[in-house]
Amino acid sequence: MEFGKVTDEELAQIDFTLPPDPEVNKQVLTPLDEPTKFYIGCAKWGRKDWVGKLYPKGTKPKDFLEHYAQIFNCIEFNAVYYRMPFPSDVWQWKSKVPEGFKFCPKFTDIITHKKRLKNTEFETGKYLEAITEFKENLGPIFLMPHPQFSPKQIQTLYDFIEQFPEDVPMFVELRHPDWYKEDGYNKELYAILKEFNRGTIITDASGRRDCVHMHLTTNECFIRFVGNSLHRTDYERIDDWVQRIKEWMAQGLKTCYFFMHQHEELHSPELIKYLIEKLNAECGTNLTPPKLHSKQENTLF
């Protein structure tokens, strides 16, 4: 993942302190009688360099998803961004995962980037026809419009969200800097997402600190963490996130989706292992960390 990538020299100058929670979060976080649910995973499963490290030695590519789903309980599913899925694709993927596993698919690029959410009724219908076949394995859909999509197009976003089926959960990430100029998050955008019960995506990337906005429009969080090849600051940033999640849990966070990225995805499993172990130690969770089969797991600092 290249988003927010910086040089080593720039990395040393960045203030990674998480912003304070905005007051509006108090409107959506209220105490619950049930524990927070966690879905933690990566953005892809088809990594050949995970064989012998995350997957058993000798694992064939056709079996990668089956092994991945035995280790993690969700996937930030970017593959469908590049090609419109068919129901038959979904049936095949679904057949390889257990009960409780969640696919969190990104919208296909023709909807978000080529047509930029305009006149997409046909394409959106085809997309929904396929991904709803995940049934109970479908997690929230991940809407990321084109990076040039700015507040000037907010009516287009409103129209798209308004027409989208209410029973299909959705989280939204926006990358144009103008969305974050007004008190850290566009107030009109916040009102729209809250009105339609759509979640915000918080992306923690080194070179785009504005996207770490900390605004929640529902009692669920969707965090995309972009690390720097297991640099010392990756672990420090995870420590801070664990403390913030702990605070949100106490306030009534229902669900936490946390997806790990690295500019070199080879290293994502190590940082997930660290994240889960810290959550278990600090937040009282009982999550199962991935078991790594190589010495590469011992790379802390």
Image: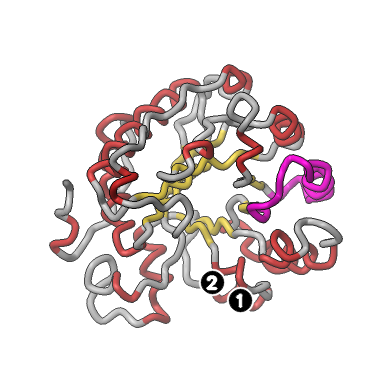
Q: Position of residue 221 (x, y in %)?
A: 53, 37
**Is residue 278 found left or right of 241 in the rendered image?**
left
- Tell me, for residue 89, which label it has, or none: 1
- In the image, farthest residue toward the front: 9
- Looking at the rendered image, the quarter that the N terminus falls into is bottom left
Q: How many numbered circles does the render carry?
A: 2
Q: Position of residue 179 (x, y in %)?
A: 65, 37
Q: Identify the secondary structure beneath mark 1.
A: helix
Q: Nearer the viewer, residue 191 or 166?
A: 191
Q: Position of residue 235 (x, y in %)?
A: 26, 41
Q: Nearer the viewer, residue 174 or 259?
A: 174
Instruction: State whether residue 63 is above or below residue 12.
Output: below
Q: Identify the secondary structure beneath mark 2.
A: helix
> Which of the 4 image quarters holds residue 12?
top left
Q: Position of residue 108 (x, y in %)?
A: 67, 65
> In the rendered image, which residue does mark 2 sit on?
93
- Tell me, for residue 172, which label it has, or none: none
Q: What stretch of residues is rendered in magenta?
A: 143-168
Identity, as a three-letter code, of the amino acid under mark 1? Asp
**Is residue 162 found left or right of 264 in the rendered image?**
right
Residue at the image point whose x is 79% and y is 45% from the top: 153
Instruction: State whether residue 282 is above or below residue 55.
Output: above
**Is residue 150 found left or right of 293 in the rendered image?**
right
